Amino acid sequence: MKKFIALFLVLALSLFVAVGCAGENNNGENGIYRDINGNEIDISLNIYRDPASPYPNYAEVAVIDPVKHPEAQDMGLFWLGIDEDGEVIERRASTAEGASLVNPDLPTVITVHGLQFNGGHRSPERFKVSSSIVCDYASFGVEEGNLDMSVLVLNHGHNVANFYWHRFAADEPNATEKKIWSKDGAGGVSYKLPNEKFNKGEDFDFSVAEFFVGEYLRAIKLIEGFGANEIRIAGHSMGTPLVTATAFILTELVRTKALHKSLIPNRIALLDGFLGIVMLNVSLPAQRTTLSWTGKPHVKRSSSETLLACLNALNNSGVAVEFYYLYNGITAKWAGNTIDRIHEVSAFVTLYPDLKTENNNYKFADDGHGAVRLWYYSSIVFPPVGQSVPSGGASSEAIRGFLGKKFIQTGGTTTLFTGDDIFESDD
């Protein structure tokens, strides 16, 4: 009996250290604050919460009430798996059924989509190759028309999860990005209803990034030994600021002793990422809203500056950052000089997926934007052979080593298969 009690206490203490509520910050001696790697930080920077105000327990407070918001229950984190009939299934990550799909000894990939103008209706994220993209299916070892990139990665020995925020992301870009960072401002954290209208968004005392944090914490507390292998979060398009903000908040929970360091992502992949509303000639919500987790304004009243500050902090905390950019695509049109600064805080790769044929309707800017995501998941399984370049198949340590370096695709551009791609340094 004593042995059982002792074992119970050890397990309880371990759980508290892993996902407990924010505790007292033992940082700040002599007015000096440090990140999780011991680097000195400027606690007055707007991305940092005031020391006297600990972070909430997001696993308990960043929850969408199923009674008040039944139509929003298709959002959140879901694990993928293969059932006994060989069919792909998805289960909510915060349930025992979802947790049963995870092997903590395998690496984990969490995928995050971008804007979803049809977001009132969720379709499973499988990253299926569309008919508008030329694909050499034989290279992937699958039948023609049957290539789902998320399933490819799952079968390659990874845990795979999707974070769905499609109802939040069914807004125009201004409003969608605002909800990632902020809970205040016009519309609050509104989402699209099945009738195509938006709710008022006033019930949520958290941003979309904080909801993601809550979903992640609720999921991992059910998985014994999670964090034993690599954790990666990949965000496409508008998923870039969401992944960045979420990963930063998780490192903050480590810094303030509310989460074990092994449970934060080892790397984040930003796939032709959206880099901030400040780049558009529109009314800027970042000038009128505050960061939800700090209550402070955006850095320099700019979402781009906030994004860059978070990415810099992630680098200093040891999180590898990789950015894959479509040559002269959507990001290029909006990014301005922000893209040059992204080079400094990431391993940066320019892709040129020229997948048009006489028989398809491939449009470089639109379909190429999606092809960047397909390229990344392909590269997890089939990294470019014989080259030392950033890719999904490179290790997190290698990605950190590429920080501040640029590469450009010069070969293998006319096929989706990534194993034969060629890159050159673009520094």
Image (tube, helix red, strand yellow):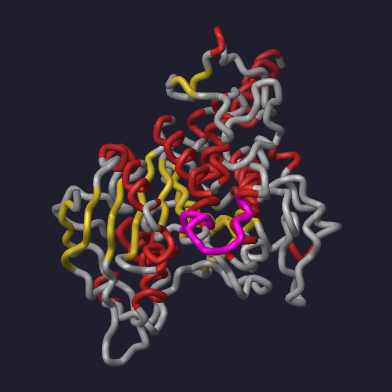
Q: Is residue 215 above or below residue 175?
A: above
Q: Is residue 38 above or below residue 397?
A: above
Return the x and y of residue 52 as percentages of the image width and height.
70, 21
At horizontal 45% and vertical 53% (from top left) the residue drawn is 234
Q: Is residue 274 left or right of residue 170?
A: left
Q: Residue furthest top?
A: 30
At horizontal 67% and vertical 60% (from top left) the residue drawn is 75
State the image quarter where residue 210 is shown. Answer: top right
Residue 280 on the magenta span: yes
Residue closer to the observer: 387 or 48? 48
Q: Is residue 6 left or right of residue 42?
A: right
Q: In this orientation, does residue 304 appear?
A: yes
What span is colored magenta in the figure? 274-286
Return the x and y of residue 39 as percentages of the image width and height.
43, 21
Return the x and y of residue 88 as percentages of the image width and height.
52, 67
Residue closer to the observer: 144 or 261? 261
